[in-house]
Amino acid sequence: MKQIFTAAFLLSVVAASAQSGQYHVSKTFAIAGDSKWDYIALNPVTQQLYAAHGTRVNVLDKVKGDSTGVIENTAGVHGVAFAVKAGKGYTTNGKSNTATVFDIRSNRVLGEIKTGTKPDAILFEPFSQKIIICNGESDNLSVIDPATDKVVATVALGGGPETAVSDGKGNIYVNLEDKNEIVKVDARTFAAGAHWSLGKGEGPTGLAINTATNRLYSGCANKLLVVMDAGNGHIVQSINIGGGCDGVAFDASQKTIFTSNGEGTLSVIAAEGADKYQTVATVPTHKGARTLVVDPATHHVYLPVADYQGATKTIVPGTFRVLEVSK
C-alpha cells in the first residue's frame, strides 16, 4: 500500500507541475504598512518596484525586495506611471482627487495636480507623450502634459473607467466597468469614439494589448478574459480565468498573457496567434492577489497582497507583501 501511495503521490506532483508549466511563487518581499493596496508598477529607468497602498507608495529593489524609498502623502493611492523623457513619475490619489508628481530617479516629490473624481488607473501614453488618468467616479479621463504638469484635456466617457491601454499609434482603449464595454479614444484629439460591447464579459477590470496582433485582452469579473480585435471591436474569443481578476498583463516577447485573480490564482495563457489562445498554467498565489506587473526583461510577475482577519476587510498587521512568480 505504501508503494502504491508513493507512486500516486509522485504522479499527482508531476501532473500538477505539468499543468502549472512550473510557474510558482519564487520569492516573497515583506513591506511595511497595513493599509489597503491596489496597483504595482515597475520603474523603467531604475528597475524598482512601486507598490501603492494606503497613503504611501513603497519603492522596492526587485531582486532583493529591500526598501529603497517611500513616496508619502498619497491619500488613497491607486497607481503609478512614468514619463521617462520628462524624468517624472505620477501617482493617482483616490481620496484627495490629485496626482502626485515625483522625480523618476530620486522619488523626490515635485508637486501635485488636481484630477477628476477618484483617480484610479494611470498610464503613460507614448503617441501623445501624455499621462492618462482614469477617474472612476467622474466617468472621464484626465490628460496631463508632463512638460507643464497641467491637465490639458478631460475626456468624457459615458461610463466608469477602470483601466486604459494604448497601441502607441494614436489610439487609447478604456474598460468601462459599469457598462461592460471598451471605449476607443483618439490620442490626437482626446475625444471618445466607438463603444464596443464585451459580449459575455461582465465588470471589466484589467486590460492589456498585444500591439503586434492588434488584440485587446480584457479581464472580467465573471471569470472571463475577452479577446477583442482593437480595429473593429469584434470579439475573437472568451477564455475562462479565475475569479476576482483585477489585473491583466501581456509579456510581448514571450507572447504570454497573465491575469491576477483575487481568488488566489494567476492564469497564464499562451497567445499562439492573433486568434488562437491556450491556457498553459493556473498558478496558486494567495487570496487577494488581484493586481500585477510583469517584468519584460526577466518575465517575472509581481503581485501585492496581504492577509485579512477572517471574513473582515481588516488587514492582519505585518502581512503586506509582494509575491514574485517565475519559472
Image (spheres, grey):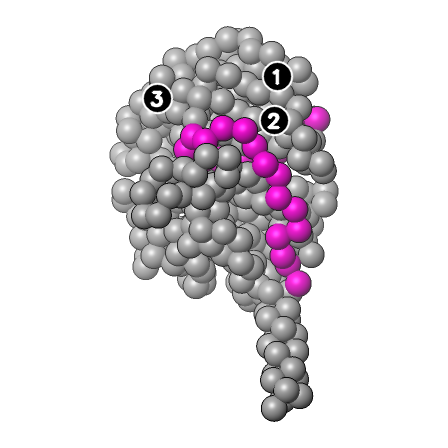
Q: Residue at x 49, y 42 (%)?
A: 305
**Which SS class for mark 3?**
loop
Q: Which residue is mark 3?
A: 95
In depth, the one of 180 and 137 nearer the eye is 137
Q: For mark 1, does the 10 Å Cα neighbourhood hold few (<14), some (14 to 19), or many (20 or more) residues?
A: some
Please name the residue that numbered disc 2 is placed on: 59
Q: Earlier in the sequence, mark 1 or mark 3?
A: 3
Is residue 294 at least partly visible in the picture? no
Instruction: Determine whether label 2 and label 3 are within 8 Å by CB.
Output: no
Q: Which amino acid type is marked by label 2?
A: Val
Q: Position of residue 133 (x, y in %)?
A: 43, 26
Residue 193 lies in what quarter of the image?
A: top left
Query: 305 left or right of 66?
Result: left
- Local packing at callout 3 (Cα closer than 10 Å; few below 14, some 14-19, many 20+) is some
Whether the residues at callouts 1 and 2 have beta carbons within 8 Å, the answer is yes
- Point out the tag, 1 or 2, that comes first from the N-terminus: 2
Instruction: Name which residue lies at 70% across and 26% down.
Output: 46
Residue 58 shows in the view: yes
Residue on which disc 1 sits: 107
